[in-house]
Amino acid sequence: MPASKPKLRLPPLSEDQLNPAQRALLDSMRAGPRGKGVSLNGPFGCYMHAPEIGEAIQQLAAFCRFKTRLPKRLSEFAILAIGRIWKAQFEFHVHAREAEEAGVRPQTIRDLKAGRVPTKAPKDERALYDFISELHRYRRVSNRTYARVQKLLGDGGIVELLAIMGSYTLTCMVLDTFQVPLPEGATPPFKEPVVG
């Protein structure tokens, strides 16, 4: 018997149910770089349940996604690597498409999805992969790995990479904790982990 599909743990909201603070958050997201297409799906619907912190989170996430000095390809690669670590179904599903459009190779995306080291990825993506993997596994980064990424991104770029990693780790935790479903008809990228 197939595993049951996780159910959203928060009551879903519709736009006509939003209180003034929630409406202000939605308007703020739509006024930013994500544009008017922002809906209450994904993490955004979760943030509506705590709109004050939701505003701070979405501002950081918007900066990390659209305004860092990292090329979009490397930013999307890092987001996918974080999504894989957390097995965040929604995050990986959405950003796999974004990453491919930004120039991440389909084979690299398949490797990340399968939990394999992306050995055929370009050197810059491999450097980020090693950095992200080491930091999550050991809670530290080796001098060698740090030097590779520092040469690639510079000091400010490393700060921004860490911000991307932190922001998307938070997003993945929100998605996983509240069991945010994939869009209708989407196939989960990962086998759903069994907990407890």
Image (cartoon, helix red, strand yellow):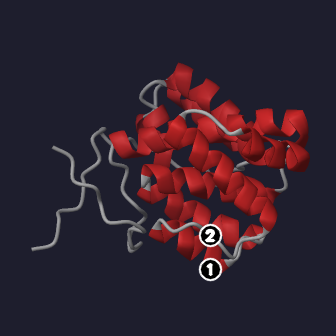
Compare residues 20 and 124 and report the one nearer the observer: 124
Quadrant location of the C terminus in the rendered image:
top left
How far from the left and from the top, in percent, is residue 72?
Answer: 80, 57
- Is 66 on the left or on the right of 111, as rendered? right
- Is 188 on the left or on the right of 169, as rendered? left
Instruction: Check disc 1: other Cα within 10 Å, few if <14, some if 14-19, many if 20+.
Output: some
Instruction: Report the disc number at residue 83.
Output: none
Compare residues 96 and 134 and report the one nearer the observer: 134
Is residue 122 visible in this depiction of the protein?
A: yes
Of the residues shown, which amino acid type is indicated by label 2?
A: Pro
Name of the residue lying farthest toward the left: 1
Q: Which residue is mark 1?
A: 107
Q: Residue at x 55, y 72 (%)?
A: 111
Q: Which residue is mark 2?
A: 118
Name of the residue lying farthest toward the bottom: 107
Q: Residue at x 55, y 33 (%)?
A: 139
How far from the left and from the top, in percent, is residue 100?
Answer: 69, 72
Of the residues shown, which amino acid type is indicated by label 1?
A: Gln
Distance between mark 2 and mark 1 Cα atoms: 8 Å
Contact check, label 2 and label 1, Cβ < 8 Å: yes
